[in-house]
Image: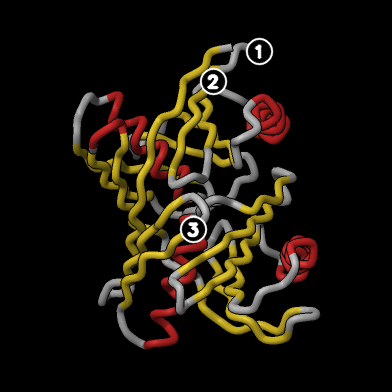
Amino acid sequence: MKMDYYVLDPTGNITILVRTPVPEAEQPAVAAGLMAAEPSAEQVGFLSSSEDCDLALRMAGGEFCGNASMSAAMLQAMSLQTESCRVRLRVSGAEKPVTVQMTAGPDGIWTGTVKMPDPMSVETVDLPEAGPLPLVRFEGISHVIMEKEVSRPEAERFARDWCACLGADALGLMFLDRAACRLVPLVYVPAAGTLYWENSCASGTTAVGAYLAAKAKKPVKASLAQPGGSLTVQVQEDGGILLTGTVRLLKYKCQ
């Protein structure tokens, strides 16, 4: 099958977005093939038209992804040949449309601000071998906030085991160092068969913002350094959450 796709860099979280129509049932297998062909990629999404939005995006595992949403919005802005626009997306794992404000910058780097979906809950759960930990649930993914270091093999086992016991569509373990404003994300998506130490995680950063705001009982704004760069989360007075980062196009391929 001829495959048209883009490789993008949203804060180091290398993302493939596919233009070629692919049936939903075949998307995980196609995604696995593309990730083998593009070893730097951490995730794959599939673009299509939308009746009520500018563009539709479905991730290979059906999860929600803020970085991929920003990437799709950048492609839409580039297609409109504009340096600033607001894009409405229909995204997997989000019940309502997602709005992204994109602004072009120097050297092909765009800044995007995503109005992130509201969390379904911010709670504390008892997890096997760890005890009570903060959990932030979204429609398409849940995140456990970890403020204690564990070994990488142990973290990877926890991600798989806890995803199953929580009944989550996908699960992130967000290793947070509050004093250093640093975040290291691990994300498991069972439907796509992927487990990655990601260079950045937009929904995980949003989860940390929601957790910090709930803990402080007031709005918060935090810029969190991650392996691929920094993402900024802002929890507003009304509880709405904005996520700001950068994205650039690495290449377009037709094969």
Which is nearer the N-term, disc 3 or disc 1?
1
Q: Relative to residue 5, is residue 171 drawn left or right? A: right
Q: Secondary structure at mark 3?
A: strand
Q: Dot 2 corresponds to which residue?
A: 20
x%, y% of residue 167? 71, 65
Q: Residues within 10 Å of mark 1 (few under 14, many from 20)?
A: few
Q: Secondary structure at mark 2?
A: loop
In the image as oriented, which residue stretches furthest toward the front? 180
Q: Which mark is residue 1?
A: 1
Q: Relative to residue 25, is residue 119 drawn left or right? A: left
Give the Cα separation between the discs numbered 3 and 1: 36 Å
Q: Residues within 10 Å of mark 3 (few under 14, many from 20)?
A: many
Which is nearer the N-term, disc 3 or disc 2?
2
x%, y% of residue 85? 21, 39
x%, y% of residue 146? 61, 75
Give the Cα separation between the discs numbered 2 and 1: 9 Å
Name the amino acid type tagged 1. Met
Name the amino acid type tagged 3. Gln
Q: Secondary structure at mark 1?
A: loop
**Quarter of the image containing the C terminus?**
top right
Q: Dot 3 corresponds to which residue?
A: 226
